[in-house]
Image: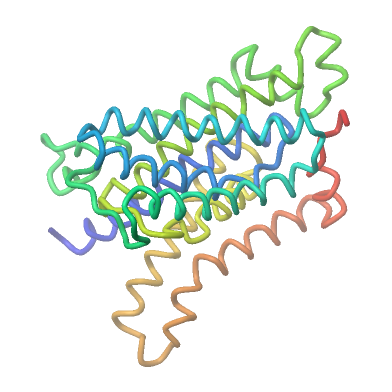
Amino acid sequence: MSELNEFVIAILRSATPLIYVTMAGVIAQRAGVWHLGLEGVMIIGACSTVVGIVLTGSFLVALLIAIAACVLASVLLWFVIDGLRANPIIAGLGLSGLGVGGTALAVESIFGSLAAVSAPFGVPRIGGFFGPYAVLSVFVLAMPFVVLALWVWLRRTRSGLRLAAAGEHPFAARSVGADPVAMRLVALAAGGVLCAIGGAELAAGSLQLFAQNMTAGRGFMSFAAAIFGGGHPFGGALAATFFSLVGVAGIRLQLHFSAVIPHDVLLALPYLATVLGVWITGRMRGGAGAAAQASELRDQ
């Protein structure tokens, strides 16, 4: 396998989980919710997939368990936001903390240890005539079609346009029969499915294991990619791919420049790129004032 193919495969493996979770953030943003709970929902999906494979011996059953768990967590966020009228930013951060801590507790309760859980197999590979790319999972192959389908839904269908209206102008949306509360529930539940797939790809796509806090901020990175991409499926996917490209490049640079550049700086490159992307987006959209306004549910 050539070095170029290895580099592309590394980018695809790194970017695919981010893109799925970024799409969840895009849908939530279109519905008027800045979803800071992506980190928690993603790690729930990763944990549920690996534990499900170990306990049931079936990837399909494990994926369904992960989807159910992530949708349940997303519905919980919706209830806290719309039912209890909590601040969505604080509620999202709380969900992220619940996901990280709850998965560690679940693993310890089931296996009696906080050690990493290894699965005997992972996500099915695409195989076939894809040459060196046959080692990639089916989720990598499906990813561009999922992004395209979301673009069609959000930008070219009546329900997608109603979702955007419910997020941007909830009172006007009600006047045409669209319920913003129900729209937010649909958006967060759909995002839960995407987070489950992203978590499954992260944990079982190539590693086939779950470890504590293995998302390592990828959910927050996906949230930043959704913002950086302007709430657009294509823009979010490109932003997530850019963050992954920087991360993979940082790993490769360690092999050649570790003696010159500090190791921690190279590891921090994707997070520095995330901060830079959010800063650029904030400057283009009017700074912190605009961000603070957009972070609230406007019909409350």
Res 97 → quadrant: bottom right
User: In x, y percent, where is residue 228?
Assistant: 63, 50
Identify the residue at horizontal 23%, vertical 44% (top origin).
136
122, above or below 160, in the image: below
Res 255 → quadrant: bottom left
Q: Is residue 21 left or right of residue 245?
A: right
300, above or below 122, in the image: above
**Viewer-nearest residue: 44 or 183:** 44
User: In x, y percent, where is residue 131?
Assistant: 12, 44
**Viewer-nearest residue: 169 or 103:** 103
Q: Is residue 148 left or right of residue 114?
A: right
Identify the residue at horizontal 32%, vertical 62% (top origin).
115
Give the total of numbered labels: 0
Quadrant for the C terminus in the image: top right
User: In x, y percent, where is residue 137?
Assistant: 25, 41
227, above or below 269, in the image: above
Residue furthest to the bottom in view is 259
Quadrant for the N terminus in the image: bottom left
Q: Is residue 281 left or right of residue 269?
A: right
Identify the residue at horizontal 65%, vertical 11% (top origin).
158
**Viewer-nearest residue: 49 or 177:** 49
User: In x, y percent, where is residue 292?
Assistant: 83, 50
Identify the residue at horizontal 63%, vertical 19% (top origin).
160
